[in-house]
Amino acid sequence: MGDIKSALEIAMEKVSKMEEPTEEEKLQWKYVPEGEKLAGRYLKEKVNLLAELNNYDEKVRKFIISGASGILARNISLPINDHVKQNNKKAMDGLKVIKKDKVAVENLFSKIRYIFNHYEEQGAQQKKQAYESLKADLGAKIQQALQQQMSPMMGAKIDVEKQPQFQQEWRKIQQQIDNQYISHLNEYIRELIDIP
């Protein structure tokens, strides 16, 4: 009968069969996280991204840029308030600095800006209409329920917006509207990350 091997022995055999990582892989493992940290510092502090990149040797710079561009692109989100708008601008400015294909970057930024404008105009209008519709529908349902119960509250003014059911439904509707924009935005962000 054959020997039964322990999990450790099996794992050690697999490790011994693995190839040594290439020099390229070692550089990637070391410098992509450094690029991510650089992007984080850039977004939080006043860091000159170009000057920081020039501190690195040419052969590792592409890994730094790869890490940084991933973080910068993923920090672009729907402009729900002024703080997010400022963060978007800073992330986009950083991407303009580090990406080589400036035309492709600007083309994607145009598409992203279109999404932002549409979100702020039509998205806001959609939300307003959905809010009023939900308020009217739920108000009518509450009044109908009170009538059926012959409640003494029948005809009383009830603040529908304060009802937990209204709040829950409103959050769902907002999320549905936002998700339409987020899915397009995420597609452009993936494309941005892939641009050299």
Image (spheres, rainbow, N blue to C red):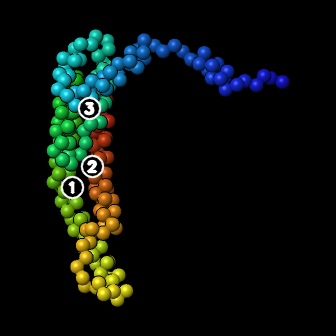
- Mark 1 = which residue? 123
Q: Secondary structure at mark 1?
A: helix
| Residue at x 31% of width, y 78% of height | 142
Q: Is residue 4 above or below residue 121?
A: above
* Marked residue nearer the N-terminal end (1 or 2): 1
Q: Which mark is residue 51?
A: none
Query: Looking at numbered disc 2 in the image, what kind of residue is underneath it?
Result: Tyr
- Mark 2 = which residue? 181
Residue 22 image-quadrant placement: top left
Instruction: Report whether residue 77 is seen.
Output: yes
| Residue at x 20% of width, y 51% of height | 119
Q: Secondary structure at mark 3?
A: helix
- Mark 3 = which residue? 72
Depth check, front residue: 47 or 130: 47
Residue 134 rendering spot, x and y as whole percentages: 27, 69
Quarter of the picture holding the C terminus: top left
Instruction: Report whether residue 104 is seen.
Output: no
Query: Looking at numbered disc 3 in the image, what kind of residue is underneath it?
Result: Leu
Whether residues under marks 3 and 1 lie with C-beta atoms below 8 angstroms apart, the answer is: no
Q: Secondary structure at mark 2?
A: helix
Depth check, front residue: 61 or 55: 55
Q: Is residue 69 left or right of residue 6?
A: left
